[in-house]
Image: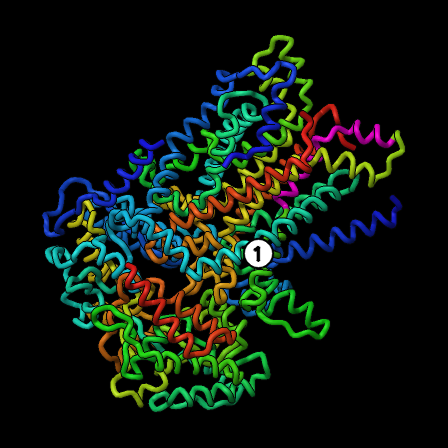
């Protein structure tokens, strides 16, 4: 038994220490090469991605790309397990929440070493910066999104309520117009779909108050009173009937996009990433409009920012880093790939392909892309630090505590900061 | 950690007329596949998880020994204590409820009713769905804000809420979900009932024993090994309950940690927070807890489980 | 029993069945609705019958859905055979034979199912990847042939112990070896337990998501539960209609398997019969 245990432990250590693939600057192989490529998503994305893979393989007949698609939760279980066993896929779709956790622990390849095969000239520096961890480019942003308010103008027209001017509005204005909707909606419809379940809303709130969720060193930097204000506002929405009752709010937040208040025409205003507009519009069947965030005109610098919808990254233990880099180059830069993918992974971060596909987009996709160009943004917040990958779960839990009166906003703020900092320190 | 009473009886029983002679050769031949599996497949990973329980292991970098850190950390881990409480409530409430429903329906559907095959299949169908990805959505159709339950309440003029997403009732809906899938133990009860020789009932009937007496003096004792089996296994399963809470709460154990089952917390630590060393230690604590409950179950079995041998 | 009581019993059972089956019915109804109506209209009323979800769902992923059904079927079949053979053998030893360390081995066997899979999966994956078994059915099937499902061993032990001992002892006195007693006497008598094992292995394997997700990386190898989840993405629009349609399609074989399998539960021991 003991020997087995030792052997098992040894195998663990060995596989974890597996040698890196080295630099991606090496020459491409002329022999047949197989690389693995993994992503999360739903069936529409799986289909489009397979088409892109086929295009790439036609161009490079000696490279076979094996696609592995998963749902979001399964994706992270599977990725962690394969990385632990030194069996990670070569090309990895990465999320902002997990980027540092993987990069700082050495699981990702420094794309700077791949410059020979992977060009980044068509990306704005501000976009590229979002993929930098500890000074190295570990990830290349795929698409960009920005936080916004989605207003159901169809619903507002029906209730004969005027759309507020989003160039000047404040959070108070949102509450006021939401209140009108709730009153006119007769119980079934509420003005605002509550938020407080994602990092986007918290980032915006902090930045409008001149703070940031994290400082450059990766410590929690948001003052407790700012956070308390955030939760006080959310609680206020629920108590005043502007947002649905807490259990309804949480039920909708826990479901998929299609089950949300916006998608089912049960709430007139909701916070969303602008790129979710087409999905929401299709689900609701109503007329939806992207509005700028409240409070932006009062803030000293724009709180809105570009968040990468996802990234491309390469495993540091890839046996074929050059071919993997070539494939990422195709995904990120080629017009053919962009024409197939369109906005499925967000509005492309690549300036050139974004401009080229915009005329080809449908109405709501176009609206999302135009919104991105129109909105004023500040510099992007620091990448979620190593250890904080569960931040959204922590935010959600504290919002629930506040909504159900189990904690005051002040208690929630203190508890949130303490817990998040402990996770970061523990990593 | 041996299952004392049970095994003593096992040993005594198999002595039989042949007089306690060891049959090692035959036994190990029959057990050969299991031994091979234990040695080559099961033992290694289990041992590895025990070792990892004494390390700091983030899945990406090699594990680093940290002595008893994981274990002392458990003492001050409030979410862990909370998760233990939630799990205990779940085990203590849902296991008996589910077994009673399963046994009751199994007795009802045992024999002498038209359309048995249909009823059995209908009651079993939910068990097939119990862990599928669709269950999150389906359960909302019953206990969601617009669900069936609230519609029924509405008839009586009672205003409902989102039962799944209210911390006071969320655990209750998961318990109902578990009871809803009573089809699995029901099938085992049905199989057990089938093994009771019909001649016992015939003899009892000739002696003039009524239905209730027959149930008490034949069905219950002869079915007791199967009841025992279901009890032991359902307790083990309930402690490890994961999928339903995971799917229904979207992996969070929410709202407000009200459905944070032990394994869900362990999973969050291991995969969500890259804290696999601590998760491994948690797993071994769970093993000790389940083992304790199982030993108690086996011990208590002495007083109510009847074996033919 | 009077006719009235019988009717009341049926009425109660039917009502209970309806309540229990409501979510299933809702799923079937939803699979026949256009995608964007599923969450906007509650209830079971269908105003038109739309079967396009079935067509779309069937072809939505990399391979036609039949491919995943076939993969699951192969996997399930192999697991059933493995569990039937290996677990019944181990159970016979624990229930009927006397050997050194029996209590300890039994406790170890039960102990192996008390650890949550989430901490076992990583070391196990490393083991199987060293053997080069990842992305084959082997990590999912081979353990079944090695009686690692202690649930079924324990189940069969309990059933064998319920069998009258006189039967196999008579055979033993007649000079039958253990192999013969096992095959000729015990196995036929424990048909209900074997049927239970088949039903359960079928359903658990058919529904098991976690290990199949981890070990089957190539979409060519995906099984039904893995395929079903790839319809769902909480952040974009999910093709719920397709997902429900394919759930219904994948539920059908399991339901039929149960309908057939439960006959063997009824049959029981031939000599004791049932009414």
Q: Is residue B112 magenta?
A: no
Q: Position of residue C20 (x, y in %)?
A: 66, 54
Q: Residue at x 64, y 37 (%)?
A: B301
Can residue A206 be seen here? The reply is yes
Where A205 falls versus A382 (above or below)?
A: below
Q: Give, as a single range, the part of the protein colored magenta.
A: B183-205
Quarter of the view holding residue A366: bottom left
Task: Give the residue number, with chain letter if any, for mark 1.
Answer: B89
Q: Quadrant of the N terminus of chain A?
A: top left
Where B284 falls versus A43 (above or below)?
A: above
Q: Callout 1 environment at 10 Å: few (<14), some (14 to 19), or many (20+)?
A: some
Q: Position of residue A145 (x, y in %)?
A: 31, 72
Q: Is residue B198 magenta?
A: yes
Q: Position of residue C211 (x, y in %)?
A: 42, 44
On screen, residue B84 versus residue A348, left or right, reads right
Residue nearest the viewer, comparing C52 with B72: B72
Q: Quadrant of the C terminus of chain A?
A: bottom left
């Amino acid at each position: 038994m003991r020997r087995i245990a030792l052997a098992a432990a040894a195998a663990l250590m060995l596989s974890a220490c597996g040698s890196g693939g080295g630099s991606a600057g090496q020459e491409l192989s002329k022999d047949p090469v197989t690389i693995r490529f993994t992503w999360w998503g739903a069936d529409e994305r799986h289909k489009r991605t397979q088409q892109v893979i086929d295009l790439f393989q036609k161009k490079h007949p000696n490279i076979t790309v094996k696609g592995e698609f998963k749902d979001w939760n399964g994706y992270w279980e599977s990725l962690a397990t394969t990385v632990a066993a030194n069996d990670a896929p070569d090309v990895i779709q990465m999320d902002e929440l997990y980027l540092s956790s993987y990069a700082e622990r050495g699981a990702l390849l420094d794309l700077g070493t791949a410059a020979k095969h992977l060009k980044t000239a068509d990306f704005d520096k501000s976009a590229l910066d979002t993929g930098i961890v500890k000074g190295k480019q570990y990830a290349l942003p795929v698409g960009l999104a920005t936080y916004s308010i989605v207003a159901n103008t169809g619903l507002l027209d029906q209730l004969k309520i005027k759309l507020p001017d989003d160039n000047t509005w404040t959070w108070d204005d949102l509450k006021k117009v939401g209140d009108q909707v709730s009153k006119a909606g007769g119980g079934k419809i509420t003005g605002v779909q509550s938020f407080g379940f994602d990092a986007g809303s918290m980032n915006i709130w902090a930045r409008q108050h001149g703070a940031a969720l994290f400082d450059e060193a990766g410590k929690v930097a948001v003052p407790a009173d700012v956070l308390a204000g955030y939760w006080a506002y959310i609680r206020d929405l629920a108590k005043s009937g502007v947002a649905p009752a807490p259990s309804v709010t949480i039920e909708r937040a826990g479901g998929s996009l299609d089950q949300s208040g916006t998608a089912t025409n049960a709430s007139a205003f909701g916070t969303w990433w602008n790129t979710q507009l087409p999905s929401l519009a299709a689900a609701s069947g109503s007329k939806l409009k992207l509005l700028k965030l409240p409070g932006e005109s009062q803030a000293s610098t724009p709180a809105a920012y570009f968040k990468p919808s996802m990234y491309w990254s390469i495993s540091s233990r890839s046996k074929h880093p050059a071919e993997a880099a070539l494939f990422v180059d195709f995904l990120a830069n080629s017009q053919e790939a962009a024409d197939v993918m369109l906005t499925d992974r967000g509005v492309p971060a690549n300036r050139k392909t974004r401009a080229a596909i915009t005329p080809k987009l449908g109405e709501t996709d176009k609206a999302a892309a135009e919104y991105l160009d129109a909105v004023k943004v500040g510099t992007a917040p620091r990448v979620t630090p190593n250890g904080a990958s569960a931040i959204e779960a922590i935010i959600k839990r504290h919002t629930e505590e506040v909504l159900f009166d189990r904690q005051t906003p002040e208690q929630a703020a203190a508890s949130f900061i303490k817990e998040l900092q402990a996770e970061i320190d523990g990593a | 950690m041996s299952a004392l009473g049970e095994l003593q009886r096992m040993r005594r029983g198999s002595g039989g007329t042949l007089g306690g002679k060891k049959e090692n050769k035959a036994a190990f031949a029959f057990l050969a596949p299991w031994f091979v599996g234990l040695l080559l497949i099961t033992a290694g990973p289990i041992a590895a998880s025990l070792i990892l329980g004494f390390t700091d292991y983030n899945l990406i970098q090699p594990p680093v020994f940290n002595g008893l850190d994981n274990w002392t950390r458990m003492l001050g881990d409030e979410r862990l204590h909370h998760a233990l409480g939630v799990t205990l409530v779940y085990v203590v409430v849902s296991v008996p409820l589910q077994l009673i429903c399963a046994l009751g329906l199994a007795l009802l559907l045992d024999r002498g009713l038209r359309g048995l095959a249909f009823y059995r299949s209908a009651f079993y169908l939910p068990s097939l769905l119990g862990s599928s990805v669709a269950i999150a959505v389906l359960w909302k159709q019953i206990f969601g804000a617009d669900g069936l339950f609230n519609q029924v309440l509405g008839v009586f003029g009672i205003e409902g809420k989102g039962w799944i997403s209210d911390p006071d009732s969320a655990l209750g809906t998961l318990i109902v979900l578990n009871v809803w899938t009573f089809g699995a133990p029901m099938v085992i009860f049905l199989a057990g009932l089938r093994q009771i020789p019909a001649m016992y009932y015939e003899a009892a009937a000739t002696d003039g024993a009524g239905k209730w007496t027959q149930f008490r003096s034949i069905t219950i004792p002869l079915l007791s090994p199967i009841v025992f089996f279901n009890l032991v296994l359902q307790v083990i399963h309930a402690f490890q309950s994961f999928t339903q809470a995971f799917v229904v709460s979207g992996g969070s154990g929410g709202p407000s940690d009200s459905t944070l089952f032990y394994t869900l917390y362990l999973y969050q630590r291991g995969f969500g927070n890259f804290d696999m060393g601590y998760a491994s230690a948690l797993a071994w604590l769970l093993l000790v807890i389940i083992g304790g409950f199982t030993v108690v179950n086996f011990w208590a079995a002495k007083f109510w489980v009847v074996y033919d041998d | 029993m009077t006719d009235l009581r019988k009717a009341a019993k049926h009425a109660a059972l039917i009502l209970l069945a309806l309540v229990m089956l409501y979510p299933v019915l809702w799923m079937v109804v939803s699979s026949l609705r256009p995608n964007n109506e599923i969450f906007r209209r509650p209830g079971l009323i269908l105003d038109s019958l739309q079967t396009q979800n079935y067509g779309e769902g069937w072809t939505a992923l990399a391979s036609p859905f039949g491919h995943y059904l076939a993969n699951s079927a192969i996997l399930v079949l192999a697991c059933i055979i493995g569990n039937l053979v290996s677990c019944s053998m181990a159970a016979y030893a624990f229930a009927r034979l006397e050997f050194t360390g029996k209590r300890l081995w039994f406790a170890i066997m039960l102990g192996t199912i008390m650890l949550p899979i989430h901490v076992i999966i990583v070391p196990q994956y490393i083991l199987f990847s060293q053997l080069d078994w990842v992305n084959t059915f082997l990590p999912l099937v081979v353990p079944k042939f090695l009686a690692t499902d202690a649930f079924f061993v324990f189940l069969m032990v309990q059933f064998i112990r319920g069998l009258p001992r006189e039967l196999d002892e008579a055979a033993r006195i007649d000079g039958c070896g253990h192999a013969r007693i096992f095959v000729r006497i015990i196995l036929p008598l424990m048909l209900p337990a074997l049927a239970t094992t088949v039903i359960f292995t079928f359903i658990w394997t058919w529904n098991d998501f976690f290990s199949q997700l981890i070990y089957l990386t190539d979409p060519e190898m995906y099984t039904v539960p893995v395929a079903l989840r790839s319809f769902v993405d909480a952040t974009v629009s999910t093709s719920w209609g397709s997902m429900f349609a394919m759930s219904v399609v994948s539920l059908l074989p399991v339901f039929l398997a149960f309908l057939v399998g439960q006959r063997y539960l009824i049959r029981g021991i031939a000599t004791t019969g049932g009414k």
